[in-house]
Amino acid sequence: MDYTPQVKNRMKRIEGQVRGILKMMEDEKDCKEVITQMSAVRTAIDRTMGLVVSSNLVNCVIDAEANGVEDPQKYVEDAVELLVKSR
């Protein structure tokens, strides 16, 4: 699968957020502030995962249609399962 520049940029931004959290910990910032930032990272990861799964699903359905698969329902089920397992 090709990962778009958009997805890669999201991951770079998340990486920066994690580095920021580590810095906050080293600076002994308030627990509430650290947890708030950790929650933001988790949300960013969840949204990025959804984007990757949906992009992959689109590619799988297009490939299935090109290869003569009449019912791409299995791909949809696999994508939903991936998202459910991630939570």
Image: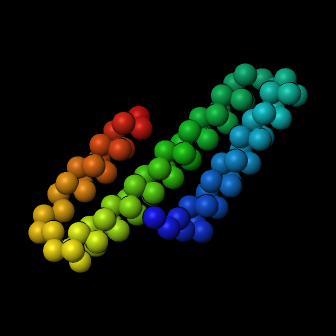
Task: Identify the image quadrant of residue 35.
Answer: top right
Task: Identify the image quadrant of residue 63.
Answer: bottom left
- Considering every residue shown, the one lying at the far left of the view is 70
Question: Viewer-proximal residue, 48 or 67?
Answer: 67
Residue at point 50%, 67% (across, down): 2
Residue at point 75%, 35% (across, down): 21
Q: Position of residue 79 (x, y in %)?
A: 31, 51
Q: Quadrant of the N terminus?
A: bottom left
Residue at point 61%, 41% (across, down): 41
Please give left or right for residue 17 compared with residue 51 in the image. Answer: right
Residue at point 45%, 57% (across, down): 52
Please give left or right for residue 59 compared with residue 77 in the image. Answer: right
Q: Position of residue 51 (x, y in %)?
A: 45, 57
- Considering every residue shown, the one lying at the far front of the view is 67
Q: How are the residues colored? A: rainbow
Q: Is residue 71 above or below residue 82?
A: below
Labels in figure, total: 0
Please give left or right for residue 69 compared with residue 54 in the image. Answer: left
